């Protein structure tokens, strides 16, 4: 009796899946899972969190190879308490949501290092799924989604190894992939049918690094954006795509100037802050038609009002600025139409955001100005740029009529030896004077600032607008891509009976920049590609590679448009195509039918509909070989076991078919070992490999040598 108990105890210790022991294959998959789950969240982790995760990973690798023991509980507890205190101290700096993400990551890492049972492994896997979901919230491009699907597969494989630890990694991966594929139909059904609700709560502040334009612009700020290849947004038009000179994407209006920096006016800032509660309203631009174009500007005169209808997919900028052609209006519930004719998001764009807008290029902006608005846009800082002030006064004396005056100012930039450059020389305290009369070299902010200063000095209200100019047309999907290096600044001047009118002095200095795009004026290698050696935009010069770039970008665009942008309207359109008139009853019946079909498929795939006793896979494969032997004159007595049958074949057919007998003997030995012996993982996989290889060889030999065995 004692010997039996000892034997059972020994078998339990040697079996990785007996009781609560964790198999080596599970531990191996966990190593991959840990790196796969945490690597996409690298930019969210604090140095302290990253250090603890690295320690846990290295320690767990040491445990896997038998170099170190599991850490004592008091050490893990001390690390957890220290990490929580550190996060509490820095939460105000990194944002509440980032602090909570770091806390979850630390819990994942510390639980990972102190795992002692299968229950601990399941807890780690479940937390891993939560971390994958958090990653998807912040990384929603098609490429990131494919990456997260692979990470999900790896995490699922850990669960598979808890129940099938003796198979090779290929078999584990196959089972994990099957489990995920079986969940796809249900996920697709829920994606299509579930209603789109507005969020019931606000996500805490992420404290993310903001990209793109800012609500304050100093001379030189936009020049920094010209070194960035990041995608700002993409636009698809319902019909006609505007020409390159018409692609002025309005984003921010700046009216305050202190001699160094342009910033937003205090009143509009207040309206932006209150937009979530008191949404500002302005009339639809179609009611403001028509607006003709003054001579001397870079706009074209339209004989008939144009209307552009389009969809914008904005990339995450962690700022509320949106983009639209003049004069843009959106009926999207998440977009505010501000009084300065901008589009503004109710919340920061922390994820890709899709919205529709309509633009009327010839609509008039503000036919009348209040006295406060007039004074705000005539205000100049005291004792600032006296030479430019004198030049503005000179223009007002020479050209009393505003349109002639502005046209003369535009010609001034064209006639004087000014240069458009992304690396202008430094400026002194009187920035505009230094630029206008000394350096005479700069980019869009320099010229827009100088033009606005002169216009105000001459008595005309003027302000700066920042946004983007241009757009790269993707011929594969017929949409425009606007990158950060296309950031631009221009001027708006208020004219009696005409309202705000755009003037862009850059068009007088570098017309190719406006008419043909950024690349027509500057070398990419000296601007946005200078600091980006691996940017895909480098493929522009190679036609076939550029074509591939367009195709991949088109796939990502369609993903953003149809998956991330699957709103209530598109959902109704799709359901109408399937069900006709969409009613609650039809939707309920449709869901019931689909769920029933999915359930039946899963039940069939696991063998619930198969009659009779299900044969274990190893036995089924062994019997399949044995059932073929009578065709070749080899019969097996019912009382013979696998080993005895192999010995019989060895005696009877060794002389006729020695190779066959040798293979069948190895095949039978492997079967007996797999079926009846208590093997460790390594020996089990080795015997399984021998068994499968022998089975394949025997099948082929029986097919080829039938006459020889008779």
Image (cartoon, helix red, strand yellow):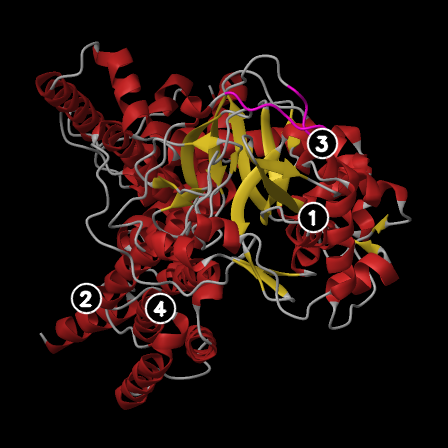
Q: CA distance from mark 2 to mark 4?
A: 29 Å
Q: Residues within 10 Å of mark 1 (few under 14, many from 20)?
A: few
Which of pointers 3 and 4 lies earlier in the amino acid sequence? 4
Residue in the image at 80% along x and 34% along y: 542
Disc number at residue 28?
Answer: none
Q: Is residue 507 left or right of residue 341?
A: right
Question: What residue sits right under mark 3 in the picture?
Answer: 298
Q: CA distance from mark 4 to mark 1?
A: 31 Å
Can residue 296 be found in the magenta stretch? yes
Check the image and name the residue furthest to the top. 580
- Of residues 529 and 421, the one drawn nearer to the viewer in this rendering: 421
- Of residues 532 and 648, the one drawn nearer to the viewer in this rendering: 532
Magenta span: 290-301
How many circles with numbers are drawn on the protein? Answer: 4
Question: What residue sits right under mark 1 in the picture?
Answer: 535
Which of pointers 2 and 3 lies earlier in the amino acid sequence? 2
Q: Nearer the viewer, mark 3 or mark 4?
A: 3
Which of pointers 2 and 1 lies earlier in the amino acid sequence? 2
Q: Quadrant of the N terminus?
A: bottom left
Q: CA distance from mark 2 to mark 1?
A: 52 Å
Question: What residue sits right under mark 4 in the picture?
Answer: 105
Disc number at residue 19?
Answer: 2
Circles 2 and 4: CB distance less than 8 Å? Answer: no
Q: Is residue 427 left or right of residue 47?
A: right
> Does dot 2 land on a helix, a strand or a loop?
loop
Which of pointers 4 and 1 lies earlier in the amino acid sequence? 4
């Amino acid at each position: 009796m004692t010997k039996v108990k000892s034997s059972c105890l020994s078998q339990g210790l040697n079996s990785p899946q007996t009781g609560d022991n964790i198999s080596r294959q599970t531990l191996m998959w966990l190593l991959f899972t840990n790196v796969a789950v945490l690597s996409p969240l690298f930019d969210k982790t604090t140095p302290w969190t990253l250090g603890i995760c690295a320690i846990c990973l290295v320690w767990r690798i040491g445990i896997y190879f038998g170099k170190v023991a599991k850490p004592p509980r008091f050490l893990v507890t001390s690390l957890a308490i220290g990490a929580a205190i550190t996060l509490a101290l820095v939460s105000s700096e990194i944002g509440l949501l980032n602090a909570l993400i770091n806390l979850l990551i630390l819990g994942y890492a510390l639980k990972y290092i102190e795992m002692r049972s299968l229950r601990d492994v399941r807890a780690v896997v479940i937390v891993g799924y939560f971390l994958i979901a958090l990653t998807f919230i912040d990384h929603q491009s098609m490429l990131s989604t494919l990456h997260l699907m692979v990470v999900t597969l790896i995490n699922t494989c850990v669960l598979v190894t808890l129940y099938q630890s003796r198979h090779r990694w290929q078999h584990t991966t196959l089972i994990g992939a099957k489990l995920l594929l079986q969940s796809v139909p249900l996920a697709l059904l829920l994606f299509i049918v579930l209603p789109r609700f507005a969020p019931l709560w606000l996500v805490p502040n992420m404290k993310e690094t903001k990209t793109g334009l800012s609500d304050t612009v100093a001379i030189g700020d936009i020049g920094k954006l010209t070194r960035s290849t990041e995608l700002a947004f993409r636009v698809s038009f319902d019909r006609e795509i505007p020409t390159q000179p018409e692609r002025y994407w309005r984003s921010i209006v700046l009216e305050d100037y202190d001699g160094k920096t342009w910033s937003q006016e205090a009143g509009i800032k207040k309206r932006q802050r209150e937009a979530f509660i008191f949404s500002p309203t302005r009339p639809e631009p179609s009611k403001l038609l028509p607006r003709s174009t003054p001579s001397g500007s870079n706009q074209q005169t339209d004989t008939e009002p144009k209307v552009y209808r389009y969809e914008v997919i904005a990339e995450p900028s962690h700022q509320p600025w949106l983009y639209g052609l003049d004069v843009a209006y959106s009926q999207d519930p998440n977009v505010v139409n501000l009084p300065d004719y901008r589009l503004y998001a109710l919340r920061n764009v922390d994820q890709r955001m899709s919205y529709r807008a309509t633009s009327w290029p010839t609509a008039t902006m503000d036919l009348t100005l209040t006295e406060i608005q007039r004074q705000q846009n005539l205000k100049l800082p005291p004792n600032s740029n006296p030479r430019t002030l004198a030049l503005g006064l000179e223009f007002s004396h020479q050209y009393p009529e505003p349109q002639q005056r502005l046209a003369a100012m535009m010609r001034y930039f064209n006639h004087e030896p000014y240069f458009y450059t992304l690396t202008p020389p430094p400026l002194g305290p009187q920035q505009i004077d230094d630029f206008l009369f000394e350096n005479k070299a700069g980019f869009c902010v320099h010229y827009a600032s100088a033009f606005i200063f002169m216009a105000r000095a001459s008595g005309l209200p003027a302000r700066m607008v920042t946004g983007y100019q241009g757009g790269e047309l993707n011929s594969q999907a017929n949409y425009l891509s606007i990158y950060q290096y296309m950031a631009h600044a221009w001027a708006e001047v208020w004219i009696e009976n005409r309202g705000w009118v755009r003037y862009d002095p850059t068009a007088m200095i570098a017309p190719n920049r406006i008419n043909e795009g950024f690349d027509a004026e500057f070398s990419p290698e000296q601007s946005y590609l200078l600091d980006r050696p691996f940017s895909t935009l480098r493929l522009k010069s190679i036609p076939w590679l550029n074509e591939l770039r367009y195709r991949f970008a088109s796939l990502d665009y369609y993903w953003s448009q149809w998956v991330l942008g699957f709103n209530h309207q598109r959902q109704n359109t799709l359901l109408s195509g399937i069900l006709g008139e969409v009613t609650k009853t039809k939707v309920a019946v449709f869901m019931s039918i689909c769920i029933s079909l999915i359930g039946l498929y899963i039940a069939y795939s696991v063998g619930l509909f198969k009659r009779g006793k299900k044969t274990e896979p190893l036995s089924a494969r062994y019997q399949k070989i044995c059932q073929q032997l009578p065709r070749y004159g080899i019969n097996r007595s019912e009382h013979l076991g696998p080993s005895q049958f192999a010995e019989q074949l060895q005696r009877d057919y060794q002389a006729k078919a020695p190779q066959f007998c040798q293979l069948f003997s190895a095949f039978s030995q492997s079967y007996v070992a797999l079926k009846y012996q208590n093997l460790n993982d390594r020996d089990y996989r080795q015997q399984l490999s021998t068994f499968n290889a022998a089975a394949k060889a025997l099948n082929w030999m029986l097919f080829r040598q039938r006459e020889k065995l008779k």
